[in-house]
């Protein structure tokens, strides 16, 4: 199996992780922090909003099964890329929409997908597009959060609807 890495943030990482864990060709999804100034940040530092990090996921995938453009299309249809530093009631720079690329090819592809996806939204896309900075894996209790806590109220009311969007718009990509 070949493997590539994609790193994206679209609000709370529990939501983004839950979506991509269900995609065929995705081997591993890790919740974490990236794009800030604090080394080895904690969740508490992220929540304060002064670390400049975003909650992100690092996706390990097989490009022979799911392509990078397909992953980005899923990303853009399962969160709102038009709200600056916000997804629903989650507000702050840590919840910004962001794509961190791992190569010039990913940067080129991401620009094209963003351009194409702009036609889907009524407002301009505000997703940041940057080269991938250091990725810090989040604490263990954040990993597989939706799988481990499906009845937790946030999961039931916020995460589950995003997983439903995946099923609705990308049923052909499910494991």
Image (spheres, helix red, strand yellow):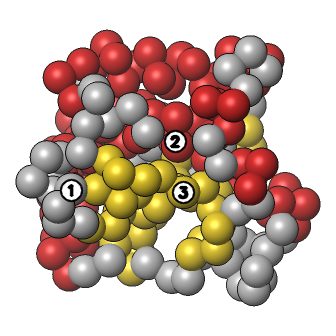
Q: Which mark is residue 95?
A: none
State the separation of the CA atoms marked 3 and 1: 15 Å
Q: Quadrant of the N terminus?
A: bottom left
Residue 112: percent from the left, percent from the top? 15, 58
Tell which tag, 2 or 1, sits nearer the viewer.
1
Q: Which residue is mark 2?
A: 16
Classify mark 1: residues with Cα within 10 Å, few (<14), some (14-19) or many (20+): some
| Vertical arrangement, residue 156 with respect to residue 159, above or below | above
- In depth, the one of 89 and 136 nearer the eye is 136
Q: Quadrant of residue 89?
A: top right
Badge 1 element: loop
The residue lying at 76 percent from left, 60 percent from top is: 139
Q: What percent of the width, then of the height, locates residue 117?
A: 23, 41
Q: Is residue 146 left or right of residue 130?
A: right
Above or below, 12 against 35 in this view is above
Foreground of the two, 1 or 43: 1
Residue under numbered circle 3? 30
Which-is-in-front pick, marks 2 and 3?
3
- Image quadrant of residue 73? top left
Q: Earlier in the sequence, mark 2 or mark 3?
A: 2
- Quadrant assignment for the C terminus: top left
Q: Which residue is mark 1?
A: 62
């Amino acid at each position: 199996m070949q493997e590539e890495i994609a790193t994206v943030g679209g609000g709370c990482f529990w939501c983004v992780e839950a979506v991509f864990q269900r995609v065929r060709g995705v081997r591993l999804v890790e919740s974490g922090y990236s794009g800030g100034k604090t080394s080895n940040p904690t969740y508490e530092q992220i929540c304060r909003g002064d670390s400049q990090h975003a909650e992100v996921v690092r996706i390990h995938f097989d490009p022979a099964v799911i392509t990078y453009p397909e992953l980005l299309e899923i990303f853009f249809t399962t969160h709102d890329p038009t709200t600056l530093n916000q997804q629903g009631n989650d507000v702050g720079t840590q919840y910004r929409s962001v794509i961190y690329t791992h190569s010039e090819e990913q940067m080129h592809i991401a620009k094209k997908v963003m351009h194409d996806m702009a036609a889907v939204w009524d407002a301009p896309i505000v997703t940041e597009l940057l080269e991938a900075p250091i990725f810090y894996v989040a604490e263990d209790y954040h990993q597989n959060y939706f799988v481990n806590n499906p009845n937790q109220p946030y999961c039931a009311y916020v995460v589950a609807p995003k997983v439903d969007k995946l099923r609705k718009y990308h049923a052909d990509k499910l494991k």
